[in-house]
Amino acid sequence: MPWVAVPYADEARRSRLNRLYGIQGIPTLIVLDSQGEVITRQGRVEVLNDVECREFPWHPKPVLELTDSNAVQLNEGPCLVLFVDSEDDGESEAAKQLIQPIAEKIIAKYKAKDEEAPLLFFVAGEDDMTDSLRDYTNLPEAAPLLTILDMSARAKYVMDVEEITPEIVEAFVSDFLADKLKPEPI
């Protein structure tokens, strides 16, 4: 490794860092700014997705397209996932644009309180990984399909409507954050 890393044999330092940053497994790459503030906990995923480091230092995007390499983030806590029919190339981008202002608003609200946002936001197209996720969570094949998946709680929340609008997404997120939605088991 040509970068600074904690030697595996340095158990005391590894233990302190694990507690400080909530590290649960290796390899883990957390990118910090010059003040020691976390830029991203997903450095490993970012390196895999941006091998030429064009987007370094990989500030988090409010909405991610769900891929094989970032699907691990579904295990980090509740995630809003908007499933779309991606055979239409513009559908994924339109879906991102639809939920991005809501994601930005939630992220800014919690950042102002110096807290992490309670949700990650994804758009999922049609591919083998998305099919596996639908199978695992027992979700219908409908598209568009608005969901919140909480893998650690083994719970899902599903909004199956004909058309997804910003108002529907915002109400769904607000109801989730206010504990007004009834979870279904995964």
Image (spheres, rainbow, N blue to C red):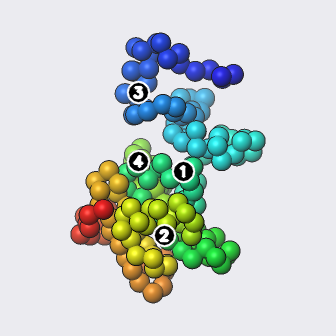
What is the residue that sits farthest to the bottom in this orientation?
162
> Is 106 in front, or is 94?
94
Residue 126 seen anywhere in this rendered image of the structure: yes
Q: Which residue is mark 3?
A: 18
Callout 3: few (<14), some (14-19), or many (20+) C-alpha neighbours within 10 Å? some
Residue lying at 39% horizontally and 80% vertically, measured from the top left: 160
Image check: 150 left or right of 108? left
Residue lying at 75% horizontally and 45% vertically, measured from the top left: 54
Q: Which residue is mark 1?
A: 70
Dividing the image into 4 quarters, which one contains the C terminus? bottom left
Q: Secondary structure at mark 2?
A: strand
Q: CA distance from mark 2 to mark 4?
A: 17 Å
Amino acid on which the number 3 mark rests in the picture: Asn
Amino acid on which the number 2 mark rests in the picture: Leu
Residue 172 seen anywhere in this rendered image of the structure: no
Q: CA distance from mark 3 to mark 4?
A: 15 Å
Q: Quadrant of residue 137?
A: bottom left
